Image (tube, grey):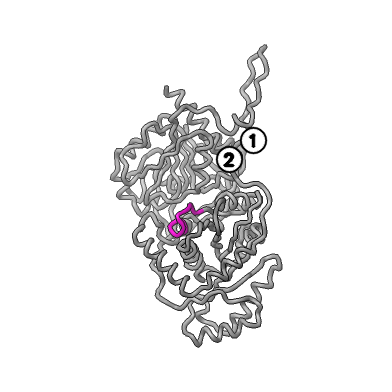
Amino acid sequence: MSSSVPRLVIAAPSSGSGKTTVATGLMAAFASRGLAVSPHKVGPDYIDPGYHALATGRVGRNLDAYLCGAELVAPLFAHGARGCDLAVVEGVMGLFDGAAGEGELASTAHVAKLLRAPVVLVVDASSQSRSVAALVHGFASWDPEVRIGGVILNKVGSERHEGMLREALDASGVPVLGVLRRVEQVGTPSRHLGLVPVAERRAEAVGAVAAMAAQVRAGCDLDALFALARGAGALAGDTWDAGEALALSPPPPLPVPVPGGSAPRPPDRAERARPQTPDGLKVAVAGGAAFTFSYAEHAELLAAAGAEVVVFDPLRDEELPDGTRGLVIGGGFPEVYAPELSANEPLREAVASLARSGAPVAAECAGLLYLSRELDGLPMCGVIDAKARMDERLTLGYRDAVAVSDSVLAEAGSRMRGHEFHRTVVEPGAGVAPAWGVRVPVRRVEGFVQQGVHASYLHTHWASAPGVARRFVERCVGSWATAG
């Protein structure tokens, strides 16, 4: 890889400063100029990338140095930005806020350094004037390896207010690249886990993104921003590729040799990348408004491992796709759609039947709720003997996890990093064979492994462990052979 794609990182001193409005507006504004814009989001957020995709017409991708490791940030970026004219990376929280207790790890500043990208600082100026210079000076000087190339002032009250802010910043050496006036909030409603996803309000979201683009076009110097983006340093190394990632991941264990027979031949690189799969082997992936949380690389890895990935909507479809031999149910908001999910009895029974057959089923967070016996008192699939309910407490944070039980995703003892983000509780929290052991916030086991089912609250990023996708597809092949 030698990526010289122009790029910007949009950061802020704190959450709530307007990063999403500015980043999404910039993406849409540059796309409207005919540029191919690659959208990215720092951290594990699933919702903002949906708005980014709407703004650019390209898949929104996450860059998470905790989940994937710092060494994969640049390769994953290059994968997403291949062939683009510009990349815009929206940061997370405040510029220097990273994984708790881990220093700069997974912060926006950390990712900006890994990408050798200039940072544009979005500052909420609504309650300050001359103090803005001290704030910007502090952020610009805190880490000399982070290049803050400009400031966009947000929520500016008047021309007089703008004049005071510009005068104060003149001595800072950091140029003002945009000024956004204080206006009514662009229509991006929130609820218990952040913005409402695009899939739930597509028509309104289209209008919201258009409004963000108009606001940014009116208030920002797009030519200066693009010139800043062109000053990003070149990235050296390999571009991430799903097939290559599978080929380079540790090979599956060799078959046990027959006494007196010849030693088994180790699989070559091509065989490790793509196991022998029957034509038409389908892995169904839940989508639609209730299941919007997924990383694009998961489907790419499954396809590279030999599966045909087919998306279905549990709110609308009464059957799984024909030929389904594996099922992936990611995160989302089943609690919002519990009545509709419960009312779709044919699909609930189809999911339960597939699980009873021993076919591989991987469920994360929302998927765990859907597989439970009930959610807020309404019947769900009944695959897992547990009850799920909404809770007032938010569970949020990165997790270091160890697989407790052998499953369709991992061997017992293997380690992965994950992320929890929910306001629900499942009782009991773990089965006889738990999925993971975690240490934070307290040492505990969680999740369920039974037959081919792996269900857990933990969100993981398979790019960090591509063998997960290969193992899942191999189990699909084995399940199909057994069923046949």
Q: Residue at x 60, y 62 (%)?
A: 108
Mark seen at residue 111? none
For the view shown, which residue lies furthest in the top direction? 260
Residue for point 28% across, 45% down: 343
Front residue of 138/457: it is: 138
Above/below status of 57 relative to 182:
above
C-alpha span from label 1 to label 2: 9 Å
From the top left corner, tell me how far across and down residue 349 is, in percent: 33, 36
Q: Residue furthest right?
A: 144
Q: Which residue is mark 1?
A: 250
Left or right: 292, with 138 as reference point: left
Is residue 54 in the magenta section?
Answer: yes
Q: Position of residue 70 (x, y in %)?
A: 65, 52
Whether residue 284 sits left or right of residue 259 in the image: it is: left
Which residues are drawn in magenta? 52-60
Residue type for callout 2:
Pro
| Circle 2 residue | 466
Q: Secondary structure at mark 1?
A: loop
Q: Is residue 261 magenta?
A: no
Q: Which circle's residue, 1 or 2, is located before the other in the chain?
A: 1
Q: Is 340 on the left-hand or right-hand side of 211?
A: left
Q: Is residue 345 above or below residue 34?
A: above
Q: Nearer the viewer, residue 404 or 33?
A: 33
User: Can residue 442 be seen from the camera position used here?
Assistant: no
* Quarter-of-image position of residue 116: bottom right
Q: Give the residue displayed 51% in from the left and 73% down from the top.
A: 220
